[in-house]
Amino acid sequence: MKRTLALGGVAAGLLASALVTQPASAAGDVASTPLASTGIAAQNIVAYWAANKAANLVGATPYDVETQVVGKHVSTGGPTADTKPGIVPAIGDEKKVTSTSKNVNLPKTTGKVFFTGSDGAPHWCTATSVQAAYKNLVATAGHCVYDVVSNAATLKNWVFVPGYYQAKTPWGIYVGKQAFTHYDFDVYEDGDRNYAFVTVYNGLKAPHDGPAFGGPAPKTPKWYDKSGGDGWNDLGGWVEVSYEVYKQYFGFDTFIGDTAVVNGRNGKKHYFIWKFVDAGRLGDNVGGQGLAYNQKIGQSVYVFGYPSGKHPDGNHAYSGHTLKWSYGKTFAAKASDIKAEEIIGIKSSFTGEGSLGSAWLSQYKSARRLGYLNGVTIGVSDTDKNNRIDTSVSPYFDGETFGVYKAAANLWSGSIA
């Protein structure tokens, strides 16, 4: 379902970015839910997306839940800082680096999160990698992780693919391990807290194009009649396994990529599964944005996302295939229909489908492709009623946001390869 919202806003304030003190977070403010609590569960999630030439990745559609925000009036009010402003440096920026650039280089940290919706179909939102102790953290909109339609806790088969394009996974597939959000969003669907931080396992990446992505099945090696056939022999992406291991994957109909059976020279059957290899930690591969909270309204931010869908007038401005950006100053806003009394807005032509979860980055350094995450898109609006989307909105990141982030940022995930 889609929910229609009433939006109001007012511009105010300047940027405040100095790190002063870190607010204490009450444990009751944080809600945490497992996504894939075991390595086998995580491998099966990769299988869901990789099998049959990555059919579910290719066929996924942009998530459109609670997207359209209807602008009716402009009003005063909006968010206020609950403590002093603070920042968490981006990965690689722990020591201050000064750089300038006239071009806007797109961040490697941004990509798509894929999941199965309550309708049973594959969908995607935008998300971004952020700084964490183990370089394993992703930030996106809360309703791109938590199922607000069926209230069935979290969305299923959740993965993050940075730099995704037409079934290409250049830095691997990262399975969500544990999701963190504010208690008020988990329980009350409070729009002021519509954000989530997700720890992810090390990425999985195919060593080359295998059958899961349209590549060839294994050919019978000349040495089959001498090998015995039941060892773990690495065949350039294929791994030979015992019948018992093959049956385990085949029996559950959830296997890593594809499986194959080859008849050896002596009539002996050889069983294979397509092997994904450990791609390493997310932050090591693409970096991670910093985090800014309790910032003054009115600062300039870049918004990076994968907008898709039509404007209300029918113009199909964005395909959702490639990463786009917009730029502007934040202003205070309200959307009382989702209990959102303290959100922020920015002028942007991003259409809603696909741009949900887009990263709002302040102090973005184009040369280094790094800045401070200061919001995530949770909806878009046509505020001047000309049938063209002109505004995106985000929760205001305050000390309680930092508390949710901090609960997730120090947890280890590890490898599932």
Image (cartoon, rainbow, N blue to C red):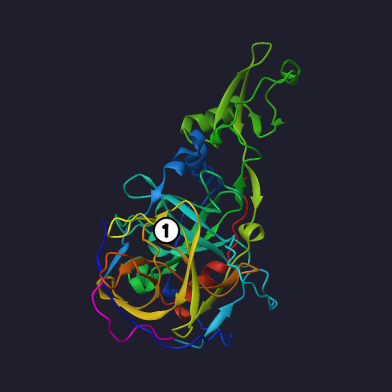
In the figure, is residue 326 to the left or right of 1? right
- Callout 1: 10 Å neighbours few (<14), some, many (20+)? many
Q: Considering depth in this image, is 414 or 63 the residue closer to the camera?
A: 63
Residue 411 appears at what percent x and percent y?
58, 64
Residue 189 in sight here: no
In the figure, is residue 247 to the left or right of 352? right
Residue 142 appears at what percent x and percent y?
40, 64
Q: Quadrant of residue 3?
A: bottom left
Instruction: Give the answer, above or below, for where 36 lies relative to 284.
Output: above
Residue 170 in sight here: yes
- How many marks on residues? 1
Picture residue at 47% right of the left edge, 33% below the top = 252
SS assignment for the magenta stretch, majority: loop
Question: Which span of residues is magenta-colored?
Answer: 71-81
Q: Is residue 341 magenta?
A: no
Q: Amino acid at mark 1?
A: Pro
Q: Quadrant of the C terminus?
A: top right
Q: Quadrant of the N terminus?
A: bottom left
Q: Quadrant of residue 351?
A: bottom left
Instruction: Give the answer, above or below, for where 266 lies relative to 54.
Output: above
Q: Is residue 76 magenta?
A: yes
Residue 318 appears at what percent x and percent y?
41, 55
Which residue is label 1 attached to? Answer: 307
Residue 339 appears at what percent x and percent y?
28, 74
